[in-house]
Image (cartoon, rainbow, N blue to C red):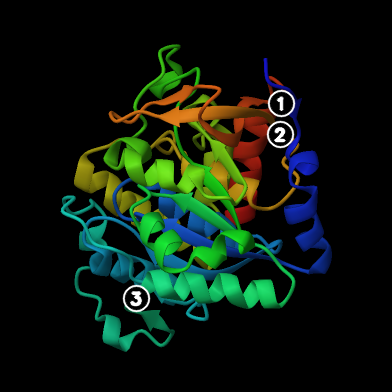
Amino acid sequence: MAPKLNLCFLALWSCCALAAQGAIPVIFDTDVATDFDDSAAIAYAIQNPDLDVQLILTATGDTIARAKVVAKFLLEVNRTDIPIGIGIATSLPPGPLFGWAADFNLSTYPGRIFTDGVAAAAEVIRRNVGAGKLTQIIAIAPCNNFPSLIARFPDVVRGGVIQAMSGSIHYGYSNSTTPAAEYNVKICPECTAAMYNASWPVYTTPLDTCGTVALRDSAYDTLLAGPSLVARTLSQSLLYWAKHLNVPVTQSTTIWYDAVAAYMATGPAPLLTFETIHVRVTSDGFTVIDPSGSLIHAALYWGSGAAEGVFEQTLADTIA
């Protein structure tokens, strides 16, 4: 069995060192507006003083429509200082949250919007390298932007650290003991393989750890009662999203997979236990342990029986 390691050891040279220099530089690669967990991850990051969100890059489907969702959210929470990058569009259908921002005019957004979001991401990473910092790339979407980023700007891999919601090792959806072809991987397996194979460090939260995370009971009450603009805007957009899909959210949120990746970017993640493994991405989207595969650091377990609940409450407290 591969050794179990805490992230603070694995990333001592990255996250921990960066924290000592100030807030950790972050780029999001997100398919916000499809599932709601992207919105939750972004909300957590912009409320966390340990993270400095320097770009939100949209991914897959109608990436301009996704940028509208990001822009409306950032405008409503007074964070238009965060630039938006428009990523590579694909043929995926519209996301349920698109309607929430359908009438938003991107030309009125007071912040910066980059039509070539991949180039903007490369510029952020290079700028941070020049300042002696690594950029945490929170990859919470199918990885369609990554082959372009790596091919066009190969130098950026020395300045990035991947924190991804990606894959399924021992557990699948709904805590099933049968691994699944996880959505972000299944949409473009070759794109995930390209991200894994690049020479930057790759940390993942597969379904094994992120697949049951939701706000329930006191954690959900904390979010709903939260006084911050971020908490109020997140709650309002959650209700819109849930109504569109006819999903009940009166007692708890849906699964917020992506929030775990945002938590990992903060540095030491004592609530999680990581294993260093080699993974092969199959053509049908499975992530299989294989000695000949790519080396990744996967959060395969919560550190204790209570750790997941502690994380959920911390997530709510941070956003609220």
Q: Nearer the viewer, residue 193 or 117?
A: 193
Q: Is residue 209 visible?
A: yes
Identify which amino acid the numbered label 2 is placed on.
Leu
Q: Nearer the viewer, residue 216 or 17?
A: 17
Residue 18: x and y, percent? 76, 62
Pointer 1 or 2: first along the chain = 2
Q: Nearer the viewer, residue 99 or 203?
A: 203
Q: Alpha-carbon neighbours of circle 2 within 10 Å: few (<14), some, or many (≥20)?
A: many
Q: Quarter-wise, where is residue 14 in the image?
A: bottom right
Pointer 1 or 3: first along the chain = 3
Residue 56: x and y, percent? 45, 67
Q: Which label lies toward us, 3 or 2?
A: 3
Q: What secondary structure is found at the residue carrying circle 1?
A: loop
Q: Alpha-carbon neighbours of circle 1 within 10 Å: few (<14), some, or many (≥20)?
A: some
| Callout 1 touching callout 3 (CB < 8 Å) | no
Residue 5: x and y, percent? 75, 30
Residue drawn at the location 52% of the way across and 76% of the way down = 123
Residue drawn at the location 24% of the way across and 81% of the way down = 105
User: Is 243 on the left-hand or right-hand side of 219?
Assistant: left
